[in-house]
Image: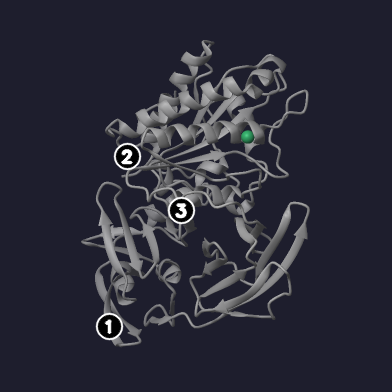
Amino acid sequence: MKACRCSVLSTFSVPLCLVATLLVAAAATAVPVTTPEGSVEVAARGDLLDVLALLRLTGAEVGFAPAAGSFTATLADLEVQFTPGSSLAVAGGRLLDLPGPLRQMGDSVFGSFATAAALVAPLGWSLGGPPAAPVLSKTTARERLILTVVRAESGVMVVVSGTARRPRVSSSASAVTLQFTAPIELGAALPLADELRGAELGEDSITLRLAPDQEMASSYPLEDPPRFVIRLQKAQPVVPMVQQPQGPVIVLDPGHGGEDLGAQSPTGAAEKDIVLAVARGVAARLQVAGITARLTRERDELVGLAERTAVANRLQAAAFVSIHVNASPARSARGAETYYMSADPSDTQAAQSAARENVGASEDALQLILWDLAYVANLNSSARLAHTIQERLNALQGIKDRGVRQAPFVVLTGATMPSALVELGFISNPEEANRLQDATVQDQLASVLAEAIAEFVRTPSLDIASPPAGTP
Ligand SMILES: [Zn+2]
């Protein structure tokens, strides 16, 4: 049985494991479920319903990935992924906090009525009625979207409010499409703006037609109240299309950006610029090595922490590497460090680094520091990734090994693949700050990171999906 990991950042944790252990297997019964096609019997155990059967009733195909131990229900271009024993699911690339855990019983998976309802929702269905006689129907309640245009120094933003759902975003040369998981309507007329030429409203999607000189720069969710932001920019010159990825995709995440400068050197150099330069170098080298690399931000812009891993989840990346530089009140602190996710920081300094990098995380993101699915499944691979990177950085820098550490970095919590966070050096150390700004040094760092990532990707995985016995 999987170890309980409920003690993580206790303020935000939910004692789901306790609930899970109190559940006792109940005798098999069946409940009548009303569907648009008529009444269908679905297996039940006590208060728990057969969620695989319910998902299939929506028309979804349910597949099982033995390596990950997870199920994926796919309906058109919508999908939801979940794992027995876990109360986390992934829908549209994002972590979904289920009301209760899923349990494998017999040859199916069972969950509470509320959990079953939460799993069918991302597929555009709702489970209503009394739990003893549930009604499964296509979601009809329309979410009333309000679109506003906000002009800021950093550019023009289209802000979508009126729904807590995070849309799947796709953009082309002159349009941005937001695909929601429920029917939508416009609560007010489209705002007048030179950048917007109009909008086409679908059943559960909206396509914004942009002026010819506009394109989407980035998109990210905001909380309190929930909003979704699409940042526009003047269209960039067309660059040749990268070939459709064939092999593994690596997602590189240059930390910070836009108004979030990250750490700063005594002379005012910003972390956000150094890490972008290095990440671009890593991406270029990986591409040369035949490994597709994508950046979570291509330029100096602010991207939400959750959006960064969502990119990697959508691309089903083989690894996610977040790139940062460190700062310490001790000006003599120097050298690279590599981190992977852990419930508990390995030491005080690891805790400080995490606290610094987590600034800007919403409570929503912090709530998702619940493990299972994303964490345990990738723990050993993440450790291997971090060690591979750190070994090469140590060799390059020829200094005392600051080593691999563990800490709860919010930017890594949503990743459903092996992930690590690299602090390239200490920008608070004047000497090291100078080196980190040196193009030659950035180049060396980039090539070492690319080598390490390529080695990680090409080494057959021997990682076992269980936590290691001790902490390093
Ligand atoms: Zn940082």
Please give the count of numbered marks on the rendered protein. 3
> On the image, numbered disc 2 is attached to which residue?
465
The quadrant of the rendered image in which ligand 1 is seen is top right
Pointer 1 residue: 40
Residue placed under numbered mark 3 in the picture = 16
Q: CA distance from mark 2 to mark 1?
A: 37 Å
Query: What residue lies at 61% left-to-right and 50% top-to-bottom?
Result: 304
**Circle nearer the viewer, 3 or 2:** 2
| Residue at the farthest bottom position | 38
Q: Label 3 vs label 2: CA separation?
A: 21 Å
Q: What residue sits 29% from the left and 36% below the top?
A: 464
Mark before the other along the chain sequence, 3 or 1: 3
Q: What is the crowding at mark 2: few (fewer than 14 residues within 10 Å), some, or many (at least 20)? A: some
Q: Is residue 432 visible?
A: yes
Image position, residue 355 (x, y; %): 64, 35
Where the N terminus falls, by quadrant?
top left
Q: Identify the residue at image location x=78%, y=24%.
A: 267
Seen in the picture, residue 219 relative to 373 is either above or below; the reply is below
Going from N to C along the chain, the mark reached first, 3 or 2, is: 3
Image coordinates for residue 397, horizontal then vertical, percent: 53, 14
| Amino acid type of the residue that numbered disc 3 sits on in the rendered structure | Leu
The quadrant in which residue 438 appears is top right
As drawn, 449 above or below 2: above
Helix, strand or loop at mark 1 = strand
